[in-house]
Image (spheres, rainbow, N blue to C red):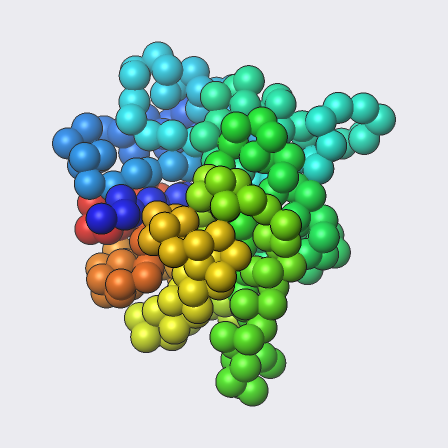
Amino acid sequence: SRKPLIAGNWKMNLNHLEAIAVVQKLAFALPDKYFAHVDVTVIPPFTDLRSVQTAVDGDDLKITYGAQDLSPHDAGAYTGDISGAFLAKLGCTYVVVGHSERRTIHGETNEIVLAKTKAALRHGLTPIVCIGEGLDVREQGTQVEYNVEQLKGSLAGLTAEELSKTVIAYEPVWAIGTGKVATPQDAQEVCAAVRATVAELGGADVAAGIRVLYGGSVSSKNVGELVAQPDVDGGLVGGASLRPDEFAALSAIA
Ligand code: 13P
């Protein structure tokens, strides 16, 4: 009975003018009736957010939006960083935290991811906390232990109420941008372990309520069998979210 969530992570693609066009095409391809069974959100670059807000508010769209990162701090001398307060003021619903590209390229540790998760919660944003193993771990077959440890490190000390307000995204690094999607069984294995870990940390009710997404080469061709898994509650979509018709098709299937 968890409503699926499809989140389109645009990464560093589409400027603020292109963003308006994509959101309008997406809205046209995804009439309001679909939102009864799926939540759809777009996660554009920071510089697009004001334009996306205007498009969404202007046409009273059911699509929500969020950001790809935030500062662990609320304000101050942090050149180049963006506060969760600003994102909340812009009407963001979600913020992605700990994406593997930030963990790898920007050296974000579990401690940093945790601090960002807390910052998101402080400002009423829903953090989409990302975890996922690389190919080396997958080849060793230790993906469950690896992801459970990363998850525990990224959520350490959160209260049950805080946990209930998070979304977890399992994105195996080897599946991101490669066209090599995890099998539904592989996705289910880790997503089930994620839910069991949340149950340990916050209790059975919290675990039963939170949404666990799969990410990594999700498309309209594979989303159906992924979300059919009992513990997969939607997708974090990269490349396919840049094409409004494809993203709408995928969302309609979820
Ligand atoms: P792709 O869908 O392009 O593989 O990207 C997945 C991703 O990293 C979403 O956050």
Query: Would you identify the image quadrant in which residue 226 lies?
Result: bottom left
Q: Is residue 33 above or below residue 214?
A: above
Farthest residue in the right direction? 77
Left or right of 17, for residue 45: right
Q: Is residue 128 above or below residue 142?
A: above
Residue 242, image x, y percentages = 40, 44
Viewer-side residue, 46 vs 109: 109
Q: What residue sits 42% from the left and 37% below the top?
A: 42
Farthest residue in the bottom direction? 140
Q: What residue sits 68% from the left and 56% below the top?
A: 110
Marks counted in the figure total 0
Q: Is residue 159 above or below residue 85?
A: below
Residue 74, image x, y percentages = 71, 27
Q: What residue sits 18% from the left and 35% below the top?
A: 36
Query: Would you identify the image quadrant in which residue 118 lies?
Result: top right
Q: Is residue 45 visible?
A: no
Residue 172, image x, y percentages = 50, 67
Left or right of 61, for residue 72: right
Residue 155, image x, y percentages = 59, 52
Q: Is residue 41 visible?
A: yes
Q: Is residue 52 above or below residue 158?
A: above
Viewer-side residue, 207 vs 92: 207
Farthest residue in the left direction? 33
Viewer-side residue, 243 vs 199: 199
Q: What residue sits 33% from the left and 30% below the top?
A: 63
Left or right of 30, for residue 212: right
